[in-house]
Amino acid sequence: MRLVIERRLNVPRWLEWVAPVVALVAALLVIALIFLLLGVNPLIAYQRIFTGAFGSAYGLSESVVKAIPLLLCGAGLVLAFRAGIYNIGAEGQLLIGAVCATGMALTFPHLPAEVLLPAMFIAGFLGGALWGVLPAWLRVRYQVNEVITTLMMVYIASELVNFLVYGPWRAPEELGFPYSAKFSASAQLPRLFLTRIHYPTLILAVLFAVLIHIVLTRTRLGYEIRVTGENPAAARYAGMDYWKVVVLVMIISGGLAGLAGVGEVAGIQHRLRYPQGISPGYGFTAIIVAWLARLNPLVAILTAFLLGGLLVGGDAIQVVMGLPVATIYIFNGIILLFVLSSDVLTRYRIRWVRS
């Protein structure tokens, strides 16, 4: 007897949706074992996570706050992954978007909000797009693996932020802390009532998720993206412009992550801070958002909210139960591992055959 892994000719529709649910449940069971090893009752921990994220108006609003960057990055990653481009660098693209928006805010503090805020969003989109198009060009021109280049550029972006907040942009009034000067009122995004929900960015996130769904399902470009992702050789044989698809997809994917960076500095921080102060790993968590949504941008709206709630609940159990800060990152990694494994088992089947 030997083990054979073979590709499924036809994947049942029900399996595509059941597999990630089963994977998520399995991941939660493994996480429960980790809680037990830490000496924590997993039922109590999950209860604290749920009530911390969804059990109060504050928890719900904070879940939405964290869902905004997750949805912007996740929607862009859905587009890239559907094209077969594995953009792992949304975190770096988010940071560059934050840097470009900060540059606009610090350079033109006296512009009215009607002019300055759109300019910051445009600058952030262009910065993130540039950070995404460079790996795309290397992929098409020199066949450099985009997983490596996008990931390495995260560290470049992170060190650029550190250079700016410890160097030329560090504000004297911050008493040596790595912060830029606080943005003027015209560079700060409005919030919803008494919450931290910067609703212009939330509207953009939902709008782009819907637009990406329309592009993928209703346009010629979407057809080319899907064909390129499923079979690049067939796409080239059919006369599709591989260069155009890859570069355009990475411009959009990187640009949306850049918009997430704008939202964080203009809607939450109101200044540029050290990298972890801007993003606690939103660009990486967005990978889970995209795959858990089965690369469907509309479903990503829901998964972004759920993962945002997990981040909020994770903060709650750190405070209440005294768990280390790395706990939530372990959870994210386990969930991503199981979701990706379910995707492989959806497309392939394993069986024993006689030798």
Image (cartoon, rainbow, N blue to C red):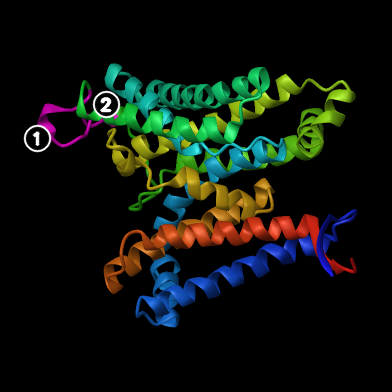
**Amino acid, disc 2:** Phe
111 left or right, relative to 130 = left
| Residue at the spot of label 1 | 175
Q: Inspect the magenta stretch and tell me whether residue 314 lies in it.
A: no
Picture quadrant of residue 222: top right
- At a point 46% along the width and 23% down the height, the residue shown is 127
* Residue at disc 2, secondary structure: helix
Within 10 Å of disc 2 (Cα), the crowding (few <14, some 14-19, many 20+) is some
147 left or right, relative to 82 = left
Q: Residue 163 carries which label?
A: 2
What is the x, y in percent for residue 43?
45, 82
| First-in-chain label (2 vs 1) | 2
Q: Which residue lies furthest to the front in this view?
A: 355
Which quarter of the image is occupied by the C terminus? bottom right
- At a point 49% along the width and 36% down the height, the residue shown is 151
* Range shown magenta: 169-185
What is the x, y in percent for residue 327?
38, 63
Of 200 and 157, the residue lying toward us: 157
Mark-to-mark CA distance, 2 and 1:
17 Å
Q: Inspect the magenta stretch and tell me whether residue 181 lies in it.
A: yes
* Residue at disc 1, secondary structure: loop
